[in-house]
Amino acid sequence: MTAPDRISGVLTPVITPFGAGLAPDAGRLIRQCRWLLDQDVGLAVFGTNSEANSLSTDEKLELIDKLIEAGISPERMMPGTGCCAITDTVRLTNHAVQAGCGGVLMLPPFYYKGVSDDGLFAAFSEAIERVGDDNLRVYLYQIPPISQVPLSVALIERLIKAYPETVVGIKDSSGDWSNTKSMLDAGWDDFRIFAGAESFLLANMRGGGAGCISATANVNAAAIHDLFQTWQDPDAEDKQAALDAVRERYMRVPMIPALKAAVAHFSGDPVWNAVRPPLMALNEAEKSVLLDGLAEIDFVIKGLSPPEDQAAE
Amino acid sequence: MTAPDRISGVLTPVITPFGAGLAPDAGRLIRQCRWLLDQDVGLAVFGTNSEANSLSTDEKLELIDKLIEAGISPERMMPGTGCCAITDTVRLTNHAVQAGCGGVLMLPPFYYKGVSDDGLFAAFSEAIERVGDDNLRVYLYQIPPISQVPLSVALIERLIKAYPETVVGIKDSSGDWSNTKSMLDAGWDDFRIFAGAESFLLANMRGGGAGCISATANVNAAAIHDLFQTWQDPDAEDKQAALDAVRERYMRVPMIPALKAAVAHFSGDPVWNAVRPPLMALNEAEKSVLLDGLAEIDFVIKGLSPPEDQAAE
């Protein structure tokens, strides 16, 4: 097994389908991953928008195995592996590395708040050293609006210096462009900076970033990847505006159930509506807000697996 | 197995000792639990101050088993069982009920923020119904400064109405007395309201509360339990002030490592200093702040197991 290359491009926190008893539905997930890969979108499975933290470690390990058994390329996978407990983080990260995943997206432990940079450094460092594998590639996951545990620029720099071949990138979902820009400006050698949403994709590419890892790439995969490829073209700003118009419709209602409702709607497969608590599926009024908004801009999702194919899995 | 009685009194989120490789040290935990029970303090193992969220579900299941095998009475245990993933919450809660625990202390799923009361109701309700055992007694765990997921009075009331024999109490670690008072004033029949710290013990007892579940009961067990028993005596306010003076010393430095440093110091057993990241053990300067502060009020902890006993386990 050779060490994975550093990643660039568009990835998405793949939404996780739930079947009977809200159990993860591996068959539907496999088909969704194939559909995303067909459009050159990589698989940041177990992200925030995957409801990863509503899955147990055992459930995640099993899904990784099933994706790979189904022929999904592990090189295209960047599973989220950062948990509250170091033992869970290590178990999941180790499994991902052994499976040949291209990288892992690592949240800091997120229960305790107001922890020190020394404590966060110890958390990442302990995880990296316990896994202890040259093939490990860690992409840090910065998402203070949800985790409530920000990663400072000083902490990131300290991690890069300590593990230059391992800590190779970050997803910045701070929602604050100045935060992304301060990292782009830091001049870290070949450090892969992903915008946390396609809203900042063009700006990020112009600043030397690596792409984006965005929830809405679950539903707008081809167009987002197209801007990644053509960001230097003269019509890039028009393409960015078109992406923004789509994203704005999804933001009118709660995002995770909205992504699932859209996939359910455009595939005709209502199973996709299910979420695990504490999230709630969109109600009918919210669905109308979403679908009416998408209709305003003639937005449709093409090529999703219809229910009859899903049932066949 | 008969259904557990509703709980009142003083409990503590028992600090979790870590040995080699930061593995949970069951032997030391068992001795600490015995010491607490000898002073009539109940065992809210796997609370925030137990670093519960830095332990995997498997580690928690194993510790419950080892405590019970060692003869610790499960009736005196109220393990924390609320995790981010419903599957973890159910597994842990189910195990606690089967083991005969007097109750469980249940956090809401705490990764996603800004979730609706409907979503939180679904999370608790799904957990209760999946466990589906008449012997389950749930004490809700309200700790918005850390979880960042508050439980509204309306939500609590809805849960009590839906599960009157199951949702039987709450630990209020909001740090906001007006929040506790609004619950005491709600008039919920025999609902057990625990202050989240002994700072509010006297006020809580005067308001009809059930006691407290406090981190500092790890280090000041007998005195806190004494105020619980004698709160109607004329010197109760003096006793409350004495408890507050001790607590204030522990608050001068980070609380969880401070509790462990104190136990390490007064038992002569440095193993107790260890914490899991992202927490950090107190440094020498912080230890001096703590121990000098405790010396000002002649505070000592008596009767802890010395290192030679620990090694014998």
Image (cartoon, coloured by chain):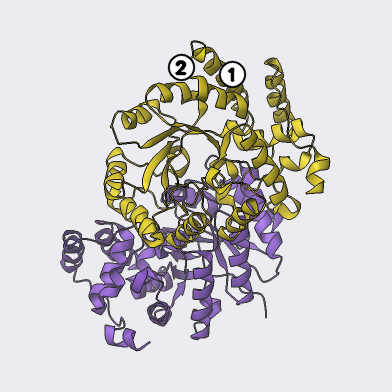
Chain colours: A yellow, B purple
Q: Quadrant of residue A171?
A: top left
- Both labels 2 and 1 in a single chain: yes
> Foreground: A161 or B249?
A161
Q: CA distance from mark 2 to mark 1?
A: 20 Å
Nearest-to-viewer mark from 2 and 1: 2
Q: Quadrant of residue A273?
A: top right
Subunit bearing disc 1: A
x then y, percent, for residue B272: 30, 72
Q: Residue furthest front?
A: A2
> Foreground: A300 or B54?
A300
Q: Mark 2 vs mark 1: which is more N-terminal?
A: 2
**Label number found at residue A245:** 1
Q: Residue furthest top?
A: A234
Q: Is residue A30 above or below residue B281?
A: above
Q: Amino acid at mark 2?
A: Gln
x then y, percent, for residue A45: 57, 45
Q: Amino acid at mark 1?
A: Ala
Instruction: Identify the residue shown where x is 31% and y is 87%.
Output: B309
**Label number found at residue A232:** 2
Instruction: Identify the residue shown where x is 51% and y is 48%.
Output: A80
SS class, disc 2: loop
Relative side of A73 to B129, left or right: left
